[in-house]
Image: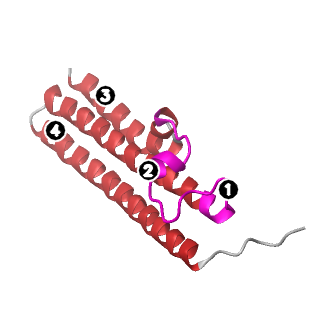
Amino acid sequence: MTGPRRLGEQELKHLELLQSVISRLGSNSFVVKGWSITLSGVLIAVADRSPAWKPVTVTVAVAVGFWLLDGYYLRQERLFRTLYEKVVTGDDPPPPALTMDAERYGGPVPWPDVLLSRPLLFCYGVLVVADSLLILALD
C-alpha cells in the first residue's frame, strides 16, 4: 500500500495558481449575481413609475444575459477545479507542468448542466419567472 503522493515545488506552485484563478472566478460570479439583482430591481422600479411591459421585457433580457455570463464563470470554475484535482491526484497522464489550459485538461463540463444547476436556477430562474409574471400583470 502506498502513502499519499508527495508534491514537488513546481506542482505546489501550479496548485497555488489554479487556486487563485478559482477564487477569482468565484468572486466574479458573486459580483455578477449582485449586479443582476440590483439592475433588475432598478428596471422594475422604472417600470413601476409608468406601468408598461417594455422595461420589464428588458429586465428579463438582462437577467438572461447575466445568467449566461454567470454560467460562463461557473463553468470555468468547474473546469479549473477538475484540473486542480488532476494535478493533486497525479492522473495518468498528468497535465503538463504549470498548464492553465483547463478547457483541454479540465475534463468535460457541459453547458446545460451548468446553466441549469441549482444555484443558477435559484437566482436567475426566480428573476426571470418574477419578471415574466410582472409582464403578464402589466398587460
Residue most toward the right?
1
Type of the residue with mark 2: Gln
First-in-chain label (1 vs 4): 4
User: Callout 1: few (<14), some (14-19), or many (20+) C-alpha neighbours within 10 Å?
Assistant: few
For the residues labelled 1 and 4, the Cα–Cα distance comes to 56 Å
How many discs mark residues in the rendered view? 4
Q: Which residues are magenta?
A: 85-111
Which numbered disc, 1 or 3, marks the residue closer to the eye?
Answer: 1
The residue labelled by disc 4 is 48
For the residues labelled 3 and 2, the Cα–Cα distance comes to 29 Å
The secondary structure type at the circle numbered 4 is helix
Q: Residue at image x 55%, y 40%?
A: 108
In the picture provided, is 70 more to the left or to the right than 135?
A: right
The residue labelled by disc 3 is 132
Which label belongs to residue 12? none
Mark 2 vs 1: CB contact within 8 A = no
For the residues labelled 4 and 3, the Cα–Cα distance comes to 14 Å
Which label belongs to residue 91? 1
Point out residue 26 in the picture as x, y percentages from the top left corner. Answer: 42, 60
